Amino acid sequence: MSSSKTSWLLGTLLISILCFVSWKHSIIDVRGAFLLVGRGLLLLGLSTLMLSYFYPRLRSLFSSNTRSTSEYSEDEEAKQRQKQAREELQEKHSEKAFSYQESVLRPRQESSMRKKEERFYRMTGEAWKLTEGEQLGEGESLGQRAQEDVDGTPNQEAVRRRKLPESATRLHPKLEVPPQKRVVVLPEEPAEDAEGVVRVALRCPSGRTIHRRFLKSDSSSVLLDWLLKTGYHPAIYTLCTTYPRQPLVIGKDISMGDAGILTHTVLNVEVKDPSTT
């Protein structure tokens, strides 16, 4: 705004001086002087208008270019500083992790491996592997070595003097051969219309009922084999009659008929009373 006022004042002053000089020296007449003043004022107004319109835009354009360039350079510098700071921080973390692994983790792993190795050798009876041992002939005098040469070869004496662990010199007792498991084999199930056939049903504690056919002449101990085969061990469970409720007398020399199984019979599988065993 101040620049436009200054230009107006300068323009008016120049035109006034030009008109005065022209009129004084009679270069132009009065009419020409007025026309010249009007044209000068018009030209001055147009130049001022154009200057007031284009000058702020040109100024803002150049200032924005310089500002964007400076901001871009500042952003690049900030990014470089951030990248350098991240790299330094990462390097510090790597050094800390390496020192922690060397000073804490590795000794801890080595100690754990030594403990596992010691436990393994003690379990396998080879604890002598954990000792450093002694060299053959260490701590022996010349007289003892001469006596060894007389008594036998150095290898034999070394074997005699070698300090072996007790587990290596102790005679292990002979292991007893475990008894072979008895294979439960039930007699072949007879046909329904065979002579002397009885049908036996077992009521299990789980709620299921198992049926099978036997002959009256079969041994009553077959019932215990059948009980074992169904998953109930005779040492824990027993067979009882339904009514009257009492344990069934079973034996190898007692047949089904002698045990009281003459017709179709239902037996209960019950847990043995500890007082009766």
Image (cartoon, rainbow, N blue to C red):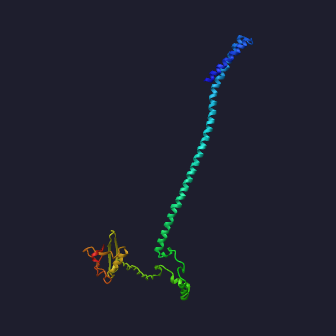
Write the residue at 62% across / 41% down. Answer: 73
Write the residue at 67% across / 17% down. Answer: 13
Above/below status of 98 relative to 193:
above
Name the one closer to the observer, 92 or 68.
Answer: 92
Q: Quadrant of residue 41?
A: top right
Horizontal relation, residue 258 to residue 44: left or right: left
Horizontal relation, residue 25 to residue 268: left or right: right
Quick one: quadrant of the C terminus?
Answer: bottom left
Question: How far from the left and from the top, in percent, is residue 149?
Answer: 56, 87
Question: How far from the left and from the top, in percent, is residue 31?
Answer: 70, 11
Above/below status of 19 relative to 176:
above
Residue 193 in sight here: no
Above/below status of 204 relative to 252:
above
Q: How many marks?
A: 0
Write the residue at 29% across / 75% down. Answer: 274
Quick one: quadrant of the N terminus?
Answer: top right
Name the one closer to the observer, 231 or 179.
Answer: 179
Residue 122 in sight here: yes
Question: How far from the left and from the top, in percent, is residue 48?
Answer: 65, 23
Question: How far from the left and from the top, in percent, is residue 86?
Answer: 56, 49
